[in-house]
Image (tube, grey):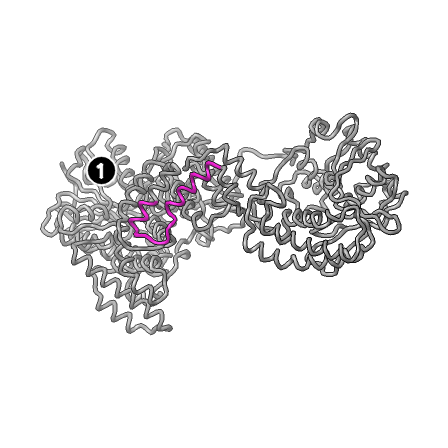
């Protein structure tokens, strides 16, 4: 191998705008070689290793033997593993050691030990990577001399240091080393080693703990080449905090410096704003396809797409790029807790402690568990119907008929203990997820998860809640970095360090995601003290993100920044780091020249006729007609299309169950006195029995109706207990006014036939007064309906708004040829006066007009002339309101 060089320790400095760093290095120093097996190639991340090898092949344009490549950290780990007496512990083992040390102290200061151990892990990392050597005396001296505002904060830091020193002592005693201390041990381990040819490139910052290791490699190499990027035009904080200190360090360990020039370039970035993340990814895909169409020499690998929050965009990129037939190489850039199949396991664990309906349905419908999908659909529909308004509190009888429930309940029982060792919890979890047939999202995730469970080998006894917290914590720092696929490179911003590319798309650049440094929470050390200790400060983290933007902006031929204006319905602003850049509207290849409706309401009258018209007449119940008057479109959806709104069974202020219960209690209380005239004693007996039945039904909901398979939740029982006394008092006051009335009928179903319509309804109660006047009584447990003072001048019965009461009067008039009075007994807890209201305008003239209008309505319905339009006056509280097309059509007129 022949080398063209000016010294044995060479620093090559490229401007950020230089386009072909790999090609320059290969042609300059390895011009005639195709065998690079003697070259040790060290770089920032695994993505750069693939990038370097690809560009090496393109430069040589023939088969080559690639160099031995490592990320700097993985190389240090290999040195420690192969050439030292130390064993490298994983992040999980480190956490378990810290957890064991944290428990005694955390209990004294009332901090959760899992959270405390996690914070101390970050605390240790800050010190070990931020300093060249471990010096507890120096660190404690600075901490004690710092003017703390609160002694409590200082006390917590001192306790954290106590644990940190105990931890380090434990490591040294057992010949262990953590990942944050690899470089210190590796520096000692390579003492006396000789390296032939070393190439370090693709790195912009060398943390203090890395510097002695790199310096030692340089000293012991025959040929040491290190490539760096530097620009004077970078922002002041980037130069002062990152570029210049690192440039000075590299100068100190090399013999010669070669400054590579580059033509002056003026790359003005463009910022595009999109309505949503979906449109944003579509726009990026279209731009990539446009570039490929313009230049046949381009490859998919010439495009780099990065996101500061990779997790939010992974699924979108996979879906939309696949639709556009754009091949891509995805560097996941996510941790194990973000794997969707692992999220499913965590949902199962959360459900055990919070067994609500939403969590249960998310498990039943998860693609990562094996539950019967058809049964899940039936379970969802039936549970939403039965437990509507009262919350999901089923009894064991109802649950026992579902095989899906039996399976998940069996798995739950495996985890149903208060305390166990961490190892014991792991074994329980393995059996539980096996019972519900858990399937992993991909092989890589399954391998990582299996390895994680194997590492959670500890006899520390914790509660189930603490075990779940431990699982979440250790999965948060279990990274999955392997790239997948070939084509356009898609990755997080940090994964892109050192990569060479022609076109860059920087997506998701909102103020929430850029800078990311604002998301970090400091627990122990204030910023001024961190600066004194030369640790990572907020200013340094911000400078790193500015550097990321600068290097991406200057690399390649073009960079495009994009951001969505809304995410999940919430307004988003572009990052403050993009201000000053040119923002232009994104031009699409298509447009709608004139707004036109893309959907219009169509009513299926044939379906209506099949359900409601028999022998030339429309058949309605009183409640159906009442709903038609409130909102024709609601009626159409509810009764014709039989649309069932998807509503989780949540506790409501006024559940249907309460109304059914009161009707049943009133009926049972009066049934003995049917046909009898009420006196003082019978009234008191009815009141007493009404109260008794209400209490009995609250204790035994199934006695109200066989379909009520539930236990009334404590919170609902509490406010029902409070309101029932008000209802009891209202019932007592109202019925006292009905002495000498005869109870004629109770909960009696009747039908009345008109010329064009047949009406069916159930009278709650009919009484006959001492003056031979019939009174129709309707119980209302909710809001008392508005009662029109006179018949509408238009003659349209639907304008009465509330039709039930006049319908009862008309039905009785048609059946008995008598005009009855109609009353509402308001058993609403909000009214404490015993409210009884009469629909006083009921007369023969009123009923005749009402009948004629109903016949006109029936004719329109039979002829197909009725319009099922939305009544926008009644949209508030309507279950269809959010997606009501008819409402939108009315509002647009």
Tell me which segment is drawn in magenta: 402-428
Q: Residue furthest left?
A: 192
- Which residue is denoted by mark 1 in the rendering? 27
Vertical order, 493 against 134 (above or below): above
Q: Nearer the viewer, residue 456 or 314?
A: 456
Q: Is residue 664 visible?
A: yes
Q: Nearer the viewer, residue 313 or 612?
A: 612
Vertical order, 105 against 277 (above or below): below
Horizontally, is 728 left or right of 43 in the view?
A: right
Residue 36 image-quadrant placement: top left
Q: Is residue 267 visible?
A: no
Q: Nearer the viewer, residue 659 or 467?
A: 659
Q: Where residue 845 appears, x then y in whole percent?
A: 90, 43
Horizontally, is 707 left or right of 324 in the view?
A: right
Q: Where residue 61 appears, x then y in whole percent?
A: 25, 30
Neighbor class of circle 1 (other Cα within 10 Å; few <14, some 14-19, many 20+) is some
Report if residue 838 lies within the magenta region. no
What residue appears at the point 84 percent right and 37 percent down from the top-left corner?
815
Vertical order, 114 against 626 (above or below): below
Q: Where residue 74 appears, x then y in whole percent?
A: 23, 46
Q: Secondary structure at mark 1?
A: helix
What residue appears at the point 88 percent right and 45 percent down from the top-left corner?
843
What residue appears at the point 88 percent right and 48 percent down from the top-left corner?
772
What residue appears at the point 21 percent right and 49 percent down from the top-left corner?
11
Image quarter of the N terminus: top left
């Amino acid at each position: 191998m022949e080398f063209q060089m000016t010294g044995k320790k060479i620093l090559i400095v490229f401007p950020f705008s230089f386009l072909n760093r790999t090609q320059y290095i290969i042609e300059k120093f390895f011009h005639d070689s195709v065998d690079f097996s003697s070259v040790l190639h060290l770089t920032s991340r695994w993505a750069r290793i693939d990038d370097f090898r690809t560009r090496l092949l393109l430069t040589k344009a023939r088969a080559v033997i690639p160099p031995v490549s490592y990320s700097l950290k993985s190389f240090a780990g290999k040195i420690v593993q192969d050439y030292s007496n130390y064993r490298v512990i994983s992040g999980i083992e480190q956490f378990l050691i810290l957890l064991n040390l944290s428990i005694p102290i955390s209990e004294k200061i009332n901090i959760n030990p899992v959270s405390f151990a996690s914070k101390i892990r970050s605390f240790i990392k800050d010190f070990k990577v931020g300093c060249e050597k471990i010096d507890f005396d120096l660190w404690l001296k600075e901490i004690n001399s710092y003017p703390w505002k609160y002694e409590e904060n200082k006390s917590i830091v001192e306790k954290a240091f106590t644990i940190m020193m105990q931890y380090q002592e434990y490591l040294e005693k057992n010949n262990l080393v953590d990942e944050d201390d690899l470089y210190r041990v590796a520096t000692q381990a390579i003492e006396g080693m000789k390296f032939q040819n070393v190439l370090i490139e693709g790195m912009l910052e060398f943390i203090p703990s890395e510097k002695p290791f790199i310096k030692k490699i340089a000293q012991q190499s025959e040929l040491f080449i290190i490539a760096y990027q530097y620009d004077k035009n970078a922002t002041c904080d980037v130069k002062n905090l990152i570029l210049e200190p690192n440039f000075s360090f590299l100068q100190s360990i090399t013999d010669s410096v070669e400054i590579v020039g580059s033509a002056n370039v003026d790359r003005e970035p463009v910022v595009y704003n999109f309505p949503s993340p979906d449109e944003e990814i579509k726009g990026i895909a279209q731009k990539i396809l446009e570039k490929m169409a313009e230049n046949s020499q381009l490859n998919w690998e010439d495009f780099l797409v990065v996101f500061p929050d990779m997790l939010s965009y992974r699924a979108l990129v996979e879906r939309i790029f696949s639709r556009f037939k754009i091949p891509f190489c995805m560097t996941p850039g996510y941790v194990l807790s973000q794997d969707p199949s692992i999220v499913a396991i965590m949902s199962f664990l959360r459900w055990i402690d919070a067994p609500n309906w939403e969590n249960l349905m998310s498990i039943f419908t998860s693609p990562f568990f094996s539950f019967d999908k058809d049964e899940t659909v039936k379970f969802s529909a039936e549970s939403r119907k039965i437990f509507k308004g009262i919350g999901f509190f089923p009894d064991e009888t109802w649950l026992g008929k579902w095989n899906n429930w039996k399976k998940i309940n069996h798995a739950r029982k495996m985890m149903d203990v208060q305390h166990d060792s961490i190892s014991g919890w792991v074994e329980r979890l393995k059996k539980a997820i096996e019972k519900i047939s858990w399937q992993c999202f991909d092989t890589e995730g399954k391998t990582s998860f299996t390895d994680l469970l194997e590492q959670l080998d500890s006899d520390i006894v914790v509660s189930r809640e603490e075990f779940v917290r431990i699982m979440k914590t250790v999965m948060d720092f279990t990274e999955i970095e392997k790239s997948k696929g070939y084509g356009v490179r898609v990755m997080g911003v940090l994964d892109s360090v050192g990569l060479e590319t022609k076109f860059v798309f920087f997506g998701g650049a909102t103020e929430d995601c850029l800078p990311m440094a604002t998301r970090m929470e400091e627990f122990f050390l204030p910023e001024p003290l961190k600066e004194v200790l030369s640790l990572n400060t907020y200013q340094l983290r911000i400078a790193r993100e500015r550097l990321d933007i600068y290097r991406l902006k200057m690399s390649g031929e073009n960079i495009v920044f994009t951001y969505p204006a809304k995410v999940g319905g919430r307004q988003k602003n572009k990052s403050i780091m993009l201000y000053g850049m040119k923002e232009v509207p994104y031009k699409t290849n298509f447009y709608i020249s004139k707004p036109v409706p893309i959907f219009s309401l169509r009513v299926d009258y044939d379906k209506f006729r099949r359900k409601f018209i028999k022998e030339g007449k429309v058949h309605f119940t009183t409640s159906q007609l009442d709903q038609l008057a409130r909102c024709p479109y609601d009626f159409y959806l509810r009764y014709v299309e039989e649309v069932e709104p998807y509503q989780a069974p949540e506790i409501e202020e006024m559940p249907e169950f309460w109304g059914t219960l009161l009707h049943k209690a009133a009926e049972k209380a009066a049934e003995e006195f049917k046909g009898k005239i009420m006196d003082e004693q019978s009234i008191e007996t009815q009141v007493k029995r009404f109260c008794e039945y209400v209490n009995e039904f609250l204790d035994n909901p199934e006695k109200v109706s066989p379909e009520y398979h539930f236990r009334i939740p404590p919170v609902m029982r509490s406010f029902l207990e409070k309101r029932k006394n008000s209802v009891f008092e209202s019932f007592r006051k109202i019925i006292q006014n009905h002495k000498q009335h005869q109870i004629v009928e109770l909960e009696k179903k009747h039908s009345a036939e008109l010329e064009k319509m047949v009406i069916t309804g159930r009278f709650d109660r009919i009484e006959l007064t001492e003056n031979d006047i019939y009174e129709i009584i309707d119980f209302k447990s909710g809001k008392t309906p508005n009662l029109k003072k006179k018949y509408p001048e238009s003659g349209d019965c639907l304008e009465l708004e509330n039709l039930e009461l006049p319908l009862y009067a008309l039905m009785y008039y048609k059946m008995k040829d008598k005009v009855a009075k109609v009353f509402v007994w308001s058993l609403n807890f909000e009214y404490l006066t015993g409210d009884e209201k009469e629909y006083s305008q009921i007369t023969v003239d009123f009923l005749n007009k009402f009948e004629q209008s109903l016949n006109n309505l029936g004719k329109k319905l039979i002829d197909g002339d009725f319009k099922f339009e939305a009544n926008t006056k009644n949209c508030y509280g309507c279950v269809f309101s959010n997606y009501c097309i008819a409402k939108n059509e009315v509002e647009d007129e």
